[in-house]
Amino acid sequence: MDKFGKSQPVTRVEDTRFLTGQGRYLEDAAPEGVLHAFVLRSPVAHGVITALELDEARAADGVHLILTLEDLEKAGLSVGMSGTTMKNRDGSQGAAPERPILARTRVRFVGEPIAVIIADTLNQARDAAELIWLDIDDLPVKLDVFSGGEPLHPEAPVNVAFDWGLGDESATQAAFDAAAHTVALEVGDNRIIVNSMEPRGCFADWDGTRLHFTYGGQGVWGMKAQLKEKLGLEDEQLHVMTPDVGGGFGMKAMPYPEYFCVAQASRHLARPVRWISDRSEAMLSDNAGRDLVSLAELAFDEDLKITAYRVSTRANLGAYNSHFAQAIQTQLFSRVLTGVYDIQTTWLQVEGIYTNTTQVDAYRGAGRPEAIYVLERVMDRAARELGVDPWELRRRNFIRAESFPYKTATGETYDVGDFEKLVRRVSEEADIPGFVARRDADAERGLLRGIGTCYYIESILGDPSEGAKVEFHEDGRVSIYVGTQSNGQGHETVYAQFLSDQTGIPVHLIQVVQGDSDLIAQGGGTGGSRSVTVQTNATLATVDVMVTAFVPFLAGEMGVDAEAVEFDGETFRAPGSNLTPSMIEAAEMARAAGRKDLLTHEARAKLEGRSFPNGAHVTEVVIDPDTGHTNVDRYTVVDDFGNLINPLLAEGQVHGGVVQGVGQALLEHVVFDENGQLLTASFMDYALPRAGDVPMIEFTSEPVPSTANVMGMKGCGEAGTVGALAAVANAVQDAVWDRGVRQADMPFTPLRVWELLQDASTATG
């Protein structure tokens, strides 16, 4: 059987549905007669609730229910939100303060939910919220990522949630003491708001015995487990579904307070209840991304080989531990701490700091973009300070192709890689030799052109196991049930294409079924670039089960011994028989013979190891020094994703990831005032990249097939963002270096770039 697919650039089948308005999103899926929820949120960043009077609001037109934390506790809910904690360097556990579903007696960020109003219409619920008398005594607001300030939680008296370390601190210090050269750079990684096209939302319908819960997320099984725990329900009392989802990016991978409130409201009222966030509400309450500052240091020997690497990070967690937050800037950051470089002496220390801001959690790449950004920025700085070409410094320190499998200092095992090959290819594709002429031509026009490079690697995350089920229907269609969840990536196309490639079933007959806990018993959802690799691995296992099950049956139909029957990826064949049934025909024969057991096949499979997508990004920016406007003029990517199922969709994932990286680097600027009020809570104030902000992105696949899975695949969903941040930032730094700018941090808004140039001019004046 062909284990690797046919790698055809098939266009997305789901796009016809989406582009003609036939998508079925949350707004389309809610039942008739649904009640509407509105969330009363804290208008201040930090304070004690001294009054919350609800009588007038409860009596308002159309209002059916108002929920507070007290109501949830009376109903028996477990009201503490879940949050991962990490161990401190001294062996103790990181802080785990209560994050109540609704505020208890104190609010800690603008937008924290306090009460939920359920009414016949959204306007009635909103009007009722205006009748609630809420009084809050202000407390001092903390916004910086240093220890100290007014404690947000008694469990963290100096607002340090954890102090985590990994590596050998003393050996790293010894290497720095003995180094021929050392280079240090402090790097800021700005906070972003995710802004998925479809805001968060959910609806719930309690039918008297079961709760049917639908939400826009990245997997139904984690949400089902959370609902069971918080509402005290049994497994059979819960049915969780996800319809079409308009973007997730990690932000929709975890539970939020509104979901539990809506579920409880439906259970209490025995009516369907819906909540959909509006855009400003999303900006206030969705988990944000990034927001950390790192001091990165490299030690070199006389030959400019890296002898040690040290990073000290202060990460803004927001007001509470979000679901995965403590792990992201520690454990996940460490997965690719040393990137593609042969460095065995390292020390990573991370402090997580509570502030009076919205929680920070996973955003496209979740820890790996942050780690690569820090490393590739300090590598670029080292090349400048040591007087060597940036690519030459990287080449000297690359892990050699013959060194794989390679165990990193942080315990990862990279299976394969040929970084030199990708660098040679990107030099050609990006026309790096022609850069000088382009820079000189711009200089004659008074413009500054810079070139930036980044070589990234990322680690596939999440559950390495996944399941798949294939069912043959009477009308000739075939369903494949999967445990991942598309948020717009094109899974319906890829999974159908892969099953077709492996079985010969015509792709137009294959329907991908996802996001329903009644139809699929178990699944790992989508996140960490895991989906296609783990799901196709499960599909291969299911195809093997199908073939094994059909062979003895077909042997009888073909009049041969079972050992003689073979499947070539399209048909069953055997010497001595003129029957060559396809998989579809085999299913029809089984149905006719009453063999219903041959019409459904399923299997679970576990990946042998993680795969590590990697690649080279080269970008050129042009800056107008009179205005500070920065334009990304050229962008070239050469990626090693291993074997591809669908190169067209892989390229689309890279384009989307790069654009999100460009957005963070140039435009996306979250601003809080000194009172913790979010000043960038609308698209009038928070800039996202538009088509005119992004050049044509050149993508080339240079595969080195993975040995960690039989398909030779590597994930690609987050790779574009992982490489884009440092490539753009290094290009800006290159453009302004000769003007005396030595510290350039994202976002490179026109004002910031103009001020950098003015400050440098004044300093050298």
Image: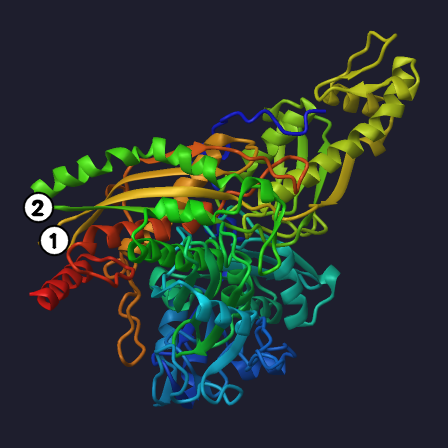
Disc 1 crowd rating (10 Å Cα; few below 14, some 14-19, many 20+) is many
Q: Is residue 186 above or below residue 1?
A: below
**Residue 62 at least partly seen:** no
Query: In front here: 407 or 36?
Result: 407
Determine which quarter of the picture holds residue 324: bottom right
* Residue 26 falls left or right of residue 608: left
Q: Residue 34 in the image: x percent, y percent?
A: 51, 59
Identify the residue at image location x=53%, y=25%.
8
Q: Secondary structure at mark 1?
A: loop
Q: Determine which of the numbered discs, if any, sits on residue 343 in the image.
A: none
* Residue 446 - label: 2
Above-or-below relation of 312 to 566: below
Circles 1 and 2: CB distance less than 8 Å?
Answer: yes
Q: Nearer the viewer, residue 539 or 471?
A: 539
Secondary structure beneath label 2: loop
- Mark 2: amino acid: Gly
| Residue at 19% from the left image edge and 62% from the top image edge | 752
Residue 42: x %, y % from top left:
38, 78
The residue at the point 42 percent across, 32 percent down is 700
Q: Is residue 69 left or right of residue 589?
A: left
